[in-house]
Amino acid sequence: MRIVVLPGDGIGPEITAATSVVLRAASERFQLGVSVEEHAVGHASLEQFGTTVRPELLDSVRTADGLILGPTATFDFKDEARGEINPSRYFRRNLDLFANVRPARTYPGRSTRFGAFDLVVVRENTEGFYADRNMEQGNAELLVTPDVAISLRRITRPCCERIAHAACKLAMKRRRHLTIVHKANVLKIGDGLFLDVCREVARSYSGLAIDDVLVDAMMAHVVRQPERFDVIVATNMFGDILSDLTAELSGSLGLGGSLNIGAHYAMAQAAHGSAPDIAGKDIANPISLILSMALLLSWHGERAGAPRFEEAARAIESAVAAAMRDGQVTRDVGGSRGTAATGQAIADNLNE
Ligand code: NAD
């Protein structure tokens, strides 16, 4: 398995290094034969090559078996004409990574302010309110006058259908419960279409329980009773916001794994951003990217018919759970270890 690794900005290089330690340990223990090809992206690439993402990287990723993208300082990248491209958007769009799968769960032995739960947010990843990627050409945000801004959202039946199928397939492998999150009471046309299509698709999965919740009420329900949910499907922006909340409910934003999946490619990414406030201090939690990498191994194993990759992914999740239980983790989740030491503890757990 050849994996392209792009460390990114802020805490990106630190959490990517910790993830690579765990990946190497998993590759050795399960004989995965993983090889890694690392390139600069974000500010490092802008300084070196005059662009945050070189187009050659797309070819490398297309011929590889997976991509690990560290968080990048997307808020800094405002002018594409100056090479300031949002790398996350670039790969999601060019590789048509339409499903963003974001699991969130609590860990035995680590108390949180809320109850135990295990859920997955499946977020549509290619359209919705993301104005920088929902048009064939141009940007769907318009400045009509200096004081008038318009942001357009795109919702299409094919994108709703494919994300609904992705969510239903996942739910069928879990507790067979799908919750559709929407705002169809106000966005009657756009979210109305999303809700109708998701319901239609979900009804074709026999034995799948379906319900739906308005996105604003969802914020209360998921805080009050997170254990009530199994797989949650949402449009792009609602899913993005909701999955940060569910990661934080599980103990920290730094625990939120995230895999972006298309028909042919997958990109592992931390659910959080580049966290410049804690960059370079060896305190960032690497677990989000480690869990995302495990999701990538599992995705590859399923496609390649190679169960040892899925076994390795499960072992990484158990090694993370053991590190959480034993407090061999960063301080955001109650431990006292640094980023690198947390990665090492998880790698050591894998070998036990
Ligand atoms: P952020 O997600 O980087 O940080 C939010 C808060 O969570 C901060 O207090 C941070 O310290 C904390 N945090 C985040 N990750 C953590 C971790 N692994 N361990 C411990 N604490 C963690 O959000 P932000 O500060 O609003 O954004 C910073 C930059 O990241 C911006 O440029 C933004 O555009 C970008 N961003 C990038 C991505 C991406 O690359 N996919 C996603 C979101 C934001």
Image (tube, helix red, strand yellow):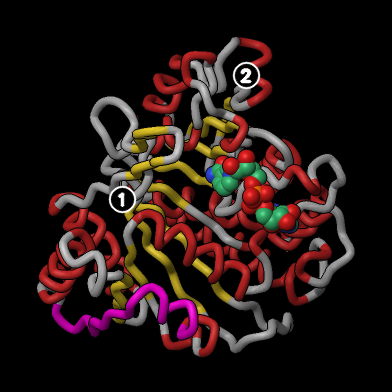
Q: Which of the image's four quarters has the C terminus?
A: bottom right
Locate residue 336, reporting x and y percent: 89, 64
Q: Name the residue beneath numbered marker 2.
A: 45
Residue 153 percent location from the top left of the image: 28, 48
Q: Is residue 342 above or below residue 205?
A: above
The boundaries of the magenta stretch are: 206-221
Residue 84 at least partly seen: yes
Who's the residue at 48% across and 77% down the image? 219
Q: Does 20 appear in magenta?
A: no
Decide whether residue 207 is among the magenta residues: yes
Say what secondary structure mark 2 lies in.
helix
- Quadrant housing residue 316: bottom right
In the image, 273 versus 12, the foreground residue is: 273
Element type at mark 1: loop
Q: Label 2 is placed on what type of residue?
A: Ser
Depth order, front residue of 315/138: 138
Instruction: Look at 38% across and 73% down and name the residue there.
Output: 215
Identify the residue shown where x is 53% and y is 64%.
314
Would you say the beta carbon of the disc 2 residue lies within 8 angstroms of ligand 1?
no
Residue matched to label 1: 128
Three-letter code, disc 1: Gly
Q: Separation of disc 2 and disc 1 at Cα?
A: 29 Å
The answer to whether 205 is drawn above or below residue 143 in the figure is below
Dot 2 or dot 1, earlier in sequence: 2
